[in-house]
Image (cartoon, coloured by chain):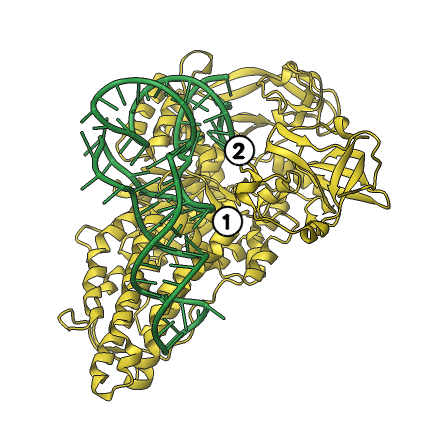
Chain colours: A yellow, B green
Amino acid sequence: MTSSATRHFFVTTALPYANGPFHIGHIMEYIQADIWVRFQRMVGNKVHFVCADDAHGAPIMLKAEAEGVTPEALVAGIAADRGKYLEGFQISFDYWHSTHSPENAELSTAIYRELKAAGLIYVKPVEQFYDPVKQMFLADRYIKGECPNCHSKDQYGDACEVCSSVYAPTDLIDPYSTLSGAVPVRKTSDHYFFKLSDPRCVEFLNGWLNAPGRLQPAVANKAREWLTTQGDQALSDWDISRDAPYFGIPIPDAPGKYFYVWLDAPIGYLASLKKYFDSGKARENGEPRTFDQFLSAPEVEQIHFIGKDIIYFHTLFWPAMLKFASRKVPDHVYVHGFITVSGAKMSKSRGTGISPLRYLEIGMNSEWLRYYLAAKLNANVEDIDFNPDDFMARVNSDLIGKYVNIASRAAGFITKRFEGKLLPVDGTRSVATAKWNELALQRETQIREYYEERELGKAVREIMELADAMNAAIDREKPWELAKDPAQATRLHEVCSDCIHAFRQLTLYLAPILPRTAERAAVLLGLEMPLRWSQLRDGGAGTIKPYEHLLQRVDPKQLEALFDFGVPKDKTEATASATAAPTGKSPEAGLAEIAIEDFAKIDLRVAKILQAEAVEGADKLLKLTLDIGDAQRTVFAGIRSAYTPEQLAGRLTVVLANLKPRKMRFGLSEGMVLAAGPGGKEIFLLSPDSGATAGMKVK
RNA sequence: GGCUAGGUAGCUCAGCUGGUUAGAGCGUGGCACUCAUAAUGCCGAGGUCGUGGGUUCGAGUCCCACCCUAGCCA
């Protein structure tokens, strides 16, 4: 029952850069947005949900060149793969387009012309590094050199990774192009700028940012800080042009100039929507208006889901661009944090993180992930952690043990004893389960609000509380005992009918998160599709089909397979392999006594460190080659924060030689060197007194 | 370095504008039960709320400093 009028939404997720497949972070964002979108549809609102590939820019141009294909072909290849991810995770986009499209070129050009007409575009010469071999200007990331501050070699053009100082690429000592190796030359070229510092922009943005409820408070704060900072950090104008060669959209009346990819990327939201309308798909979805009518309609709420890394573009440039191109501005930008894996930041280069494709390929249920993420997501800009043990516990306990279990406990009786027939809901009956319906409906408003506010974790908690209450009520009624007494048949029928009605309501509450399970449950229950929030109040008599399992449990083997890249399952293991002492606790407090036989199982030996080297891609590990007397061993030790390779080579230490070898991403670690200390810089490697030689047993 | 957010039971997280013995779920210990995908129910154990100061009759909740984590710095 919606008392308010139907709302109309235009919803997007951030456009993924088309130089590679989706990673788990993309999928998380899509799942978050998709759950919200499905919820809105269920309560009767109209949503048009689109996205597109972000196809332009130098990285794609260069990658295509490296692979010997055209940028178009590269992007098409990426796009061809998108569908299996989106279907696999049940992301219900209405349209998926590309920024490399006629619609986007048309819209970008039009918006640019309007900004120009508004007096917000100007041209200014810019001196930049230029690669004389590749014959192109170089973005900061394509220039390396020696840090002007700490003199570390091979630092990028914008900041030093060693001393963290920030500088201009022209400050680098002995700069070189990472593309050709050539020494870059300075060259001047005209660049086009969007005058964000214009008082009109600043005034507009102040108003836009401060509109109540528009942005999450943390996001509004951040944007306001950017907007109001004075001095050399003050808001500056935005360089929106790039010189040829560039894969992008040509700037009108400016030969050899292209729009910077970040100008046409957000316009891609509109381009995708336009294509969706022009292709007739919007009409199929019940939207009679044209693209222009819809986009400019005041009641249409325009909403962007994005990650916290691109707040700057979406809260300053994007609304300002739209405003001064005389268009409607976004109503909300909803920002989420990143996903970490076992507490470690995911990173493609390090190979950590979860491959969404692998997740699907090894047969893991997409709804497990949808549920797990929903259980952890909130409306804040907070990172959330994917923890394998937590994942399994959460999914198995909540979805199987609590939710599905309710149907599973009652359906057998209904089918075998009552020919599948349900009694209608009746709160006046004396059975313990009869009151539950009322309880479930009391929580409706709250659950609805949580969905609306993107407090998915809270919604899940609320729903699971209901499931707990039902399971407890079933235990009070003991249907298995009622079943033994023919005189109690009616009572049994009442209890079990209540269970199935409860299952229907829980299914509806969970449907935005578990669309496929909800659909299968709907078949079982004979519910009309698509599912609607109003079916919470159905509660009549009905007939169900014989029950089949709707969801499987998470199998630990699958989780192992998911992480079987040699990545340590939890990052403490990697460091623990080097620090034998339990941190912070005295041994007598932490460990039980052992017998001498136990100690005899431990093969400790003096080892000579023949070689020590940093491990590329692991900032905590050193790779050690050890002489342990009769053999050489490779050991990865998490001691890089305390030792440099030079300090270690040649010295003696103690190694646990019969530790089960551990496969790591970087290779096999065949032992553990002993060290003490809490970690960080305070790690102290053990050494024998002088006279000891490699291979001697420690006893 | 500047800024932002966070640091609460083994794990994942709630704790509104400061107010009686700090909560939940999972895990764990015990008991019960067997309808249910080793599912469910009942009872219990577990926290000096990052550290150190301060304000207050009273602080996880406000202020200051510091430590740690993550991110942003166009």
Percent from the top left, x then y, of residue A544?
A: 31, 78
The chain to which mark 2 is attached is A
Badge 2: residue crowd in 10 Å (few <14, some 14–19, many ≥20): many
Residue A275 seen: no
Farthest-out residue, left: A428
Residue A241 seen: yes
Q: Residue at x 47, y 12 (%)?
A: A232
A310 or B34: which is nearer to us?
A: B34
* Labels 1 & 2 near each other (Cβ < 8 A): no
Query: Which residue in the protein does label 1 denote?
Result: A387
Relative placement, left or right, of A563 versus A408 is right
Secondary structure under the numbered disc 2 in the rendered image: helix
Farthest-out residue, bottom: A486
A74 or A402: which is nearer to us?
A: A402
Q: Residue at x 21, y 65 (%)?
A: A437
Farthest-out residue, top: A231
Percent from the top left, x then y, of residue A156?
A: 64, 24
Percent from the top left, x then y, of residue A276?
A: 42, 50
Cα distance in 3D space between marks 1 and 2: 35 Å
Dot placed on the residue nearer the N-terminal end, 1 or 2:
2
Hey, which quadrant is residue A615 in on the image?
top right
**Where A122 falls versus A97 (above or below)?**
above
Relative placement, left or right, of A306 versus A345 is left
Quadrant containing the N terminus of chain A in the rendered view:
bottom left
Query: Which residue in the protein does label 2 denote?
Result: A261
**Where A56 falls versus B42 (above or below)?**
above
